[in-house]
Amino acid sequence: MTDRDRARSLLRDAARVVVLTGAGVSAESGVPTFRGAGGLWKSFRAEELATPEAFARDPRLVWEWYQWRRELVAECAPNAAHHALARWAASRDGVAIVTQNVDGLHAAAARAVERRDGVDPARAEPIELHGSLAATRCTRCDWREPVGQRVDATSRETLPRCPACGALARPGVVWFGEALDERTIRAAFAAGESAGVCLVVGTSGVVQPAASLAGVTRRSGDAVIEVNPDETPITAIATVSLRGPAGEIVPGLVAP
Ligand code: BV8
Ligand code: ZN
């Protein structure tokens, strides 16, 4: 039995599966990964800009980066991996798609699933651990817009303000050093604990607490399948590690 066959049968036989994806699942859609070659912007690293300190220091620069990413992602479409995972999750019970990505491509793939007997696109809705690039929210009150207006980051004066309280608005993502939404992280880890298999696709396994999800499944004595062209810290706990791009490997793992 090949590794792919083994992975395929583990996924087919599992009552519950948690899928954890990272930037690598969107690489073939043209979205730059964080730590790969394309992860730079104007010589800044993501970790330098995706922080509350960077925003407090220079909200204009941080908004310029997010507006650039919003325009870049607006040109990107879900790839074969996103669509295969969405169709699979919509067509059976027990699959939770948990993503670290903020590009909205899993949600777009879920919306593209055609509703019919036994297929419910709502089951393919992702848990977005780190929020959403498209969203804008207030830095002070709980005002939030799921799809924010285009931001003019040419000066501080043109940056978006909260319509409710007038405070500066910010991207609706979770920055480094910020806590994840309690309910979101609880839902993700509950899925990890109850899953018989954790399918990890396209993450370097560096960012916490997301990367711990695979370990949660492993500790409850269950299987971890990794899809990544490279080795990662998750490889060490993987039952099966499949070396290659998500768009080429994932559809074959979950096809009916
Ligand atoms: C928090 C939104 C605590 C913003 C992002 C231990 C416990 C808790 C925290 C920490 C900890 N250790 C360190 C921390 C701090 C920090 C952290 O993890 N730092 C890292 C850098 C060490 N964690 C945090 O700050 C988190 N907050 O824990 O708060 C707390 C508690 C209470 C009160 C206050 C605080 C918050 C982390 C969230 C950060 N926000 N995104 C934005 O996007 O602008 S994370 C960001 O990195 C993206 O979401 C991205 O998805 C994510 C992870 O990176 P990857 O997805 O893995 O992407 P990467 O480029 O690294 O890897 C791509 C992979 O794909 C590679 O392996 C590559 O080989 C592969 N690949 C490439 N092509 C393909 C492919 N795979 C398949 N197919 C292909 N074609
Ligand atoms: Zn406000």
Image: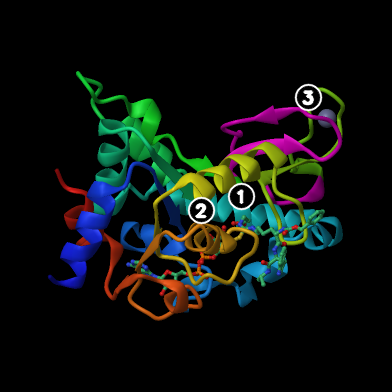
Q: CA distance from mark 1 to mark 3?
A: 24 Å
Q: Residue at x 47, y 73 (%)?
A: 234
In what quadrant does ligand 1 lie?
bottom right
Farthest front residue in view: 221
Does residue 180 appear left or right of residue 219 in this picture? right
How would you rate the neighbour count of disc 2 (Cα within 10 Å): few for under 14, some for 14-19, many for 20 or more?
many
Mark in the foreground, 1 or 3: 1
Does residue 63 appear left or right of residue 58 in this picture? left
Q: Main secondary structure of the magenta part?
A: loop
Image quadrant in which you'd find residue 247: bottom left
Residue bearing the label numbered 1: 130
Is 134 in the magenta? yes
Where is 203 relative to 69, above or below? below
Q: Which mark is residue 105?
A: none
Q: Residue at x 23, y 48 (%)?
A: 12
Residue bearing the label numbered 3: 163
Query: Nearer the N terminus, badge 3 or badge 2?
Result: 2
Q: CA distance from mark 3 to mark 2?
A: 27 Å
